[in-house]
Image: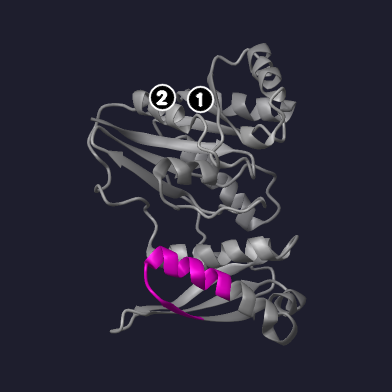
Amino acid sequence: MKSGYVAVIGRANAGKSTLINVMVGEKVSIVSPKPQTTRDRILGVLTEDEYQIVFVDTPGIYKARNALTDMMMRTTETSAKSVDYILYVVDGHDGIDEEEFTLIEKYKALGIPMAIAYTKIDIMPKENIPLDMAKFADAGLDLDVFPVSARKGKNVRELKAFLVEQMPEGERVFEDDIVSDKSERFMLAEIMREKILLKFDKEIPHGIAIVVHTFNRNENGVYEVSLDIVCERANHKAILIGKQGKAIKEVSSFARQDMEKFLQAKVFLTTYVKVKEDWRDRPSLMKEYGYEDLKG
């Protein structure tokens, strides 16, 4: 059978996580319209009778501003060097510039087989697509390019079939019913962070960490979950809580609904907001909150 790893790499907010979720058929990574949504290397596992592809979702590429984002960029670099194939994702809606071509050349130079997923074609002028395809040709990039829409499912099947053909012969890495390497506890924390990313603007969502303290299933089948939302400033805490606790109640309600869908059971969720100043530049706190450098 065919079996291998595909690193999905690209600039921040290019649509990497959405594309992986669609190809795997399950939500293995959170999504939002903001950069820095994906912080960890997350594996999404697609298993069929004749093949297994392990997609490696990586943090978006952008300039590091603190110890956390510096670690995220190292995670992306390490992931790109330890796979069978690279799928570089380009945001077609935003267009292509010289910096994009420089990044593509950088990863192509690793010597690992690579293709381009040109995403979001459902929300861009159709006449831009052939113009951008011509840019790839003019740049002299000898790479297969797949215009796709993950939201609409357009050309995703063709991309998936292509990737299957690129995989080496091998055995399954994961059991058939595994869709991600991440734990349920991790996914609950990510669901909470996703809702905060969607509700709050600007810097506040990027300066938060989620720490799950309690994750128990009671005899009646209800999950008891308690977690901390850690932010960097006292004024951020005030915004997260909102007037008379309205904001935190609202975001917690949205998160609980998604947690129940994920766990297929009722959830009793308790949330606390705490302040740890500049935790993104404090390695000991980063480690405590689950952010560590990827070692190979």
Q: Is residue 178 magenta-colored?
A: no
Q: Position of residue 210 (x, y in %)?
A: 55, 69
Q: Is residue 224 left or right of residue 204?
A: left
Taken as a whole, is the magenta stretch helix, strand or loop? helix
Indicate the quadrant where residue 68 lies.
bottom right
Q: Nearer the viewer, residue 176 or 203?
A: 176
Q: Is residue 120 left or right of residue 256?
A: right
The amino acid sitting under disc 1 is Ala
Residue at 67 percent across and 25 percent down: it is 101
Q: Is residue 160 visible?
A: yes
As helix, strand or loop, the secondary structure at mark 1 comes to strand
Q: Quadrant of the C terminus?
A: top left
Residue at 60 percent across and 44 percent down: it is 60
Q: Position of residue 191 (x, y in %)?
A: 52, 64
User: Which residue position holds label 2?
Assistant: 162
Q: Is residue 153 left or right of residue 171?
A: right
Q: Is residue 282 visible?
A: no
Q: Is residue 268 magenta-colored?
A: yes
Indicate the quadrant where residue 206 lies.
bottom right
Q: Which mark is residue 115?
A: 1
Q: Are marks 2 and 1 in contact (CB under 8 Å)?
A: yes
- Span shown in magenta: 253-269
Mark 2 or mark 1, earlier in chain? 1
Q: Position of residue 146 (x, y in %)?
A: 53, 25
Give neighbour class at mark 2: few <14, some 14-19, many 20+ (Cα, 10 Å).
some
The amino acid sitting under disc 2 is Phe
Give neighbour class at mark 1: few <14, some 14-19, many 20+ (Cα, 10 Å).
many
Placement of 142 over or under 46, stated as above or below? above
Q: Quadrant of the N terminus?
A: top left
